[in-house]
Amino acid sequence: MSEVCVRNLAFKAGQTMKVKAAINSDASCFSINIGHSENDLALHFNPRFNAHGDSHTIVCNSRQGGAWGSEQRESVFPFQAGETFKVYITHNNDSFQVKLPDGNVVTFPNRQGDDMYNYFHMDGNAKFISIKVD
């Protein structure tokens, strides 16, 4: 398991975050989280190879005050165990758009509605390589 946490990272509406990581060869899942803290997440992006009853599914959610919202499931799954990937997360005022490695885009509502988030956390069966905000 590899974990990285960045605080005081200004991710503002109109910006795009590029995340690069290498997926473990025996991966079950990993997550990318953006928000204000562990208990206040505007975006929980969770590709699941085989975890929590899901197989080859991307689950997105939000968390406010420690309480999870309604999950959004995506059947497109371009991730491969043992491979390096890049995703591009664009923060719009009303949503997040996650451009996947195959070019597909997952859109998730910005339920918290804030213009800036300063917390980034990645966890699970992937080794974090880099993050860049433009």
Image: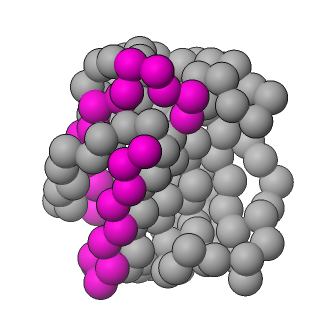
Q: Which of 54 and 90 is in front in this view?
A: 54
Residue 28 drawn at (x, y percent): 57, 28
Q: Is residue 87 visible?
A: yes
Q: In which quarter of the image is residue 116?
A: bottom left
Examine the rendered structure and indicate whether residue 44 appears above or below residue 87.
Answer: below
**Is residue 70 shown left or right of residue 9?**
right
Q: Does residue 95 appear anywhere in the picture?
A: no
Q: Quadrant of the C terminus?
A: bottom left
Q: How many marks?
A: 0
Q: Residue at x 45, y 37 (%)?
A: 125
**Left or right of 13 in this view: 51:** right
Task: Give the magenta range.
Answer: 1-29
32 up-or-down from 106: above or below: below
Q: Position of residue 6 (x, y in %)?
A: 31, 72
Q: Which residue is drawn at 52% across and 79% down?
A: 37
Point out the image quarter for the N terminus.
top left
> Which residue is located at x 37 percent, y 48 percent?
2
User: Where's residue 46, x and y in %?
Assistant: 57, 42
Q: Is residue 35 left or right of residue 40?
A: left
Could you tell me residue 50's position as x and y percent?
66, 23
Between 69 and 91, the one nearer to me in the picture: 69
Residue 91 lies within the magenta run: no
Q: In this view, does 122 lie above or below 73?
A: below
Q: Residue 4 magenta-drawn? A: yes
